[in-house]
Image: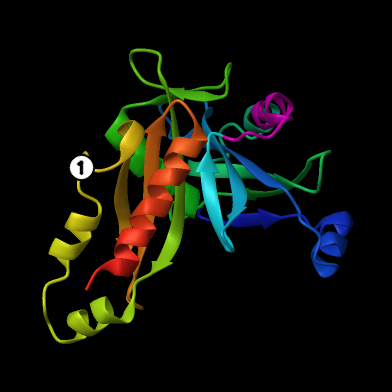
Amino acid sequence: MGGVVEQFIPEVLEAQRTNQRVPEASVQFLADGLGSPRIIGSADVVQHGGAELFAGPSNHPELPRLQRFAGELLRAMEGRLLGPGSFDFTGGPIPRFTETNVRETAVTCRLRGVFQSVTGASYDPTTGQFLDAGGRSWHWVGADYVPVPKPVNRAKRAGEPIDGRLIAALAPGSFPQGASVLPTRIDGRGGYGLVAMAPDERANALRAFDAACERLQQRE
């Protein structure tokens, strides 16, 4: 299928036109033909340090209601959806459904996929948390493009290896609170996709993400 269905909300367009902050959240699902479509995650779009980041699970106060709505949509569309996707919501304190994304290349799919592969955490729609086998909650924060400083770009153009620098910046065990950071992609423009993951609270993952970005900026 691989299509995108969009519904434009007048209130959202007006808020964007006047530069108002429009909170965004999404509920991710998987329809793989191996059973009924199911909810596998949730995420927020957050503004941090002048950048737009994705973070999961969602902290939206209306998350239980968003998940119930998403569940109703999945039941209504069962047999007509295939693959991973998300239901996106936006529009202020009272969330509005804006679109259904069915794209394997969606940013949240890539970030969440790396996060779950590393942590082994599964999403529990009842609590709205990613929980590992021991019941500990895990959080992720990521971006699809983090620019790399010019010295690294120059080294890349000169044919010098840069993998060692990236590995050093994201060395396992070098982040506090049991956090870790991994690349999700390398951009042809000289940037990285990064996802940070940490137990217990989003702030731990956010601190690890900031630390990784700072290290990459310092790499010579």
Is residue 63 on the magenta stretch? yes
Q: For the point 59% across and 31% down, which residue is it?
A: 78
Q: For the point 54% across and 38% down, which residue is it?
A: 28
Residue 178 in view in this figure = yes
Is disc 1 placed on a helix, strand or loop? loop
Q: Main secondary structure of the magenta part?
A: helix
Residue 24 in picture, x, y percent from top left: 68, 48
Is residue 114 on the magenta stretch? no
Comparing 72 with 141, the one in front is: 141
Q: Amino acid at mark 1?
A: Pro
Residue 17 in picture, x, y percent from top left: 83, 69
Q: How is the image coloured?
A: rainbow
Q: Which residue is most to the top?
A: 134
What range is drawn magenta here? 58-71
Query: In the visual, does 74 lie left or right of 173?
Result: right
Q: For the point 76% across and 53% down, which residue is it?
A: 22
Residue 179 in picture, x, y percent from top left: 33, 37
Comparing 94 with 59, the one in front is: 59
Query: In the visual, does 186 lie left or right of 64?
Result: left
- The residue that disc 1 covers is 172
The number of discs equals 1
Q: For the point 31% across and 64% down, which residue is it?
A: 216
Q: Quadrant of residue 199?
A: top left
